């Protein structure tokens, strides 16, 4: 039986390894992590992450050929293939702070692999890493190898949270990068054989290590750029009376552009886009490519602009102050169908409103009060470190409250912000919400989920990103 071990039981390590175990009953998969609470959760009825379909996959093979353990060293030592799927946060200090990837966790995993290995291994980069990381990892492994042969492969993960199980079941492509030596190609073939158990061969792409590493950063940069492009257009739509959904529909019909990923919103979030673009910017700068770095940096800047613009719209509409006013926040996760809040635009919007002394009442169907409290008090970039290193939940912010019900959150509110596109927000009883709110009652839809005309008929003053403005907002300043 082939033995696989994955270091890092997070949003990537957990689901990807569960899928390998599910599709390959003849392979033993052990996912290890230094976080005891995370491993305990993977072994319990309540998995540490919410992802549609994940429960079924995990429960069908857990304790058969899928195991979760904190005994990192012994399982790494036993494995033939070791995936590394640990955090690669943005550096907060020293050279490249605020941009470069912090490879502390990766390096410590590599050193541990070298220390405990007694047999040859294929080491697979699953984390998103800067180009040429494999070279550094190779050096760490070979200089500590005691004669053991390590082959490094790059196998970046393209799953999207919220659709991870679908994406893993039927990926657009699986990318495997390896050295162009006979040993490197043998390792590529071994990993390809694992995926080939369920992924059609023409979707398994092999290439050199550096292309594979860069492809992941490039893919995220292109995806985020599309969102920033439509969001930039949304500001112009508001200024001119055009409707961003109509513009997106029209341009999406062009087969060269395509219709997906063209929804205007309050901004993108998630653990990867900003981090990976900043990392790309840093790599460009290190290679003397200032113009290229500036080009990609602008994608992040437009995202920040969009979040600030949303807050400004809200405050300007409400007589230029939200001090002491109750604002309901519907949705805190960075997108629907996940409980993940890393880099969610809700954090910046809430900070903006709290800065103006608003009273926030927050509801998200999947995010806990404890998580939101951490997010609202944590320093930028601190979230992307192993859970046990993140400070415990801080004392409550007095002007933030939490509910497990959208109606409770909006009761007595002056304004409602929709910050995640949860399906349930489309079908709320908005008449009931309106009746229980202070008047004039405002809705600021950061995800374009509500029916603007219907809500206006009820009596709401509605702002929906990139849509023709309510008469109320027309003459108010909007830009940052
Ligand atoms: P995560 O934070 O959910 O999981 C990482 C895990 O690694 C944590 O549980 C942490 O305790 C563990 N860990 C850190 N150092 C360790 C060590 N030395 N030994 C054992 N365990 C260790 O992060 P996530 O989201 O799974 O991301 C992992 C990597 O995958 C990152 O590089 C990320 O950029 C990349 N990625 C993430 C995607 C996503 O949708 N979240 C998609 C594609 C790639």
Image (cartoon, helix red, strand yellow):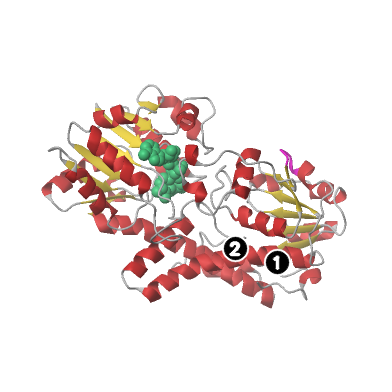
Q: Residues within 10 Å of mark 2 (few under 14, many from 20)?
A: many
Q: Position of residue 151 (x, y in %)?
A: 20, 44
Q: Which residue is mark 1?
A: 312
Q: Quadrant of residue 141?
A: top left
Q: Report the mark closest to the observer, 2 or 1.
A: 1
State yes or no: Cβ of the residue under disc 2 lies below 8 Å from any atom of ligand 1. Answer: no
Any magenta on residue 351?
A: no
Locate the N terminus and report the quarter of the image it occupies: top left
Q: Position of residue 149 (x, y in %)?
A: 15, 40
Q: Which mark is residue 439?
A: none
Residue at horizontal 57 percent and vertical 49 percent from the top: 378
The image quadrant where one finds ligand 1 is top left
Q: Relative to 70, does residue 281 appear above or below in the rendering? A: below
Is residue 16 visible from the viewing direction of this image?
no
Q: Position of residue 397 (x, y in %)?
A: 70, 46
Q: Quadrant of residue 23?
A: top left
Q: Position of residue 124 (x, y in %)?
A: 28, 43
Q: Relative to 96, does residue 290 appear above or below in the rendering? A: below
């Amino acid at each position: 039986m082939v033995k696989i071990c994955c270091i890092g039981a997070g949003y990537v390590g957990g689901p990807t390894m569960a899928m390998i175990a599910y599709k390959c009953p003849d392979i033993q998969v052990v996912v290890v992590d230094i976080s005891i609470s995370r491993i305990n959760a993977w072994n319990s009825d309540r998995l540490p992450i919410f992802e549609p379909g994940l429960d079924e996959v995990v429960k069908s093979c857990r304790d058969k050929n899928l195991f979760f353990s904190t005994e990192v060293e012994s399982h790494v030592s036993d494995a033939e293939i070791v995936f590394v799927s640990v955090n690669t946060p943005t550096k907060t200090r020293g050279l490249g702070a605020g941009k470069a990837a912090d490879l502390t966790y990766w390096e410590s995993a590599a050193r541990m692999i070298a220390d405990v290995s007694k047999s040859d291994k294929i080491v697979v980069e699953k984390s998103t890493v800067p180009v040429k990381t494999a070279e550094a990892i190779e050096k760490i492994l070979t200089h500590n190898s005691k004669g053991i042969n390590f082959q490094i492969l790059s196998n970046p993960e393209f799953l999207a949270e919220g659709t991870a199980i679908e994406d893993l079941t039927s990926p657009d492509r699986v990318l495997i990068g390896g050295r162009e030596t006979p040993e490197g190609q043998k390792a590529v073939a071994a990993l390809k054989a694992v995926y080939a158990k369920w992924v059609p061969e023409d979707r398994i792409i092999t290439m050199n290590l550096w292309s594979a590493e860069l492809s992941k950063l490039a893919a995220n940069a292109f995806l985020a750029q599309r969102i920033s492009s439509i969001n930039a257009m949304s500001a112009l739509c508001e200024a001119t009376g055009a409707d961003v959904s109509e513009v997106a529909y029209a341009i999406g019909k062009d087969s060269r552009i395509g219709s997906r990923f063209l929804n205007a919103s309050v901004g993108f979030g998630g653990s990867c886009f900003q981090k990976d673009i900043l990392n790309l910017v840093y790599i460009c700068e290190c290679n003397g490519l200032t113009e290229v770095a500036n080009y990609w940096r602008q994608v992040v800047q437009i995202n920040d602009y969009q979040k600030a613009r949303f807050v400004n719209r809200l405050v300007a509409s409400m007589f230029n102050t939200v001090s002491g006013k109750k604002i309901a926040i519907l949705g805190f996760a960075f997108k629907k169908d996940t409980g993940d809040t890393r880099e969610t635009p809700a954090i910046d919007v809430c900070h903006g409103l709290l800065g103006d002394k608003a009273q926030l009442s927050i509801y998200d169907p999947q995010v806990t009060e404890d998580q939101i409290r951490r997010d609202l008090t944590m320093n930028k970039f601190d979230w992307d470190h192993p859970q046990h290193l993140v400070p415990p939940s801080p004392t409550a912010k007095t002007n933030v409250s939490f509910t497990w019900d959208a109606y409770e959150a909006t009761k007595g509110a002056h304004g409602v912000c929709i910050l995640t596109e949860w399906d349930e927000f489309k079908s709320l009883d908005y008449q009931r919400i309106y009746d229980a709110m202070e008047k004039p009652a405002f809705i600021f839809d950061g995800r374009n989920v509500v029916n603007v005309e219907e809500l206006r008929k009820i009596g709401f003053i509605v702002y929906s990103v990139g849509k023709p403005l309510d008469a109320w907002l027309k003459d108010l300043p909007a830009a940052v």
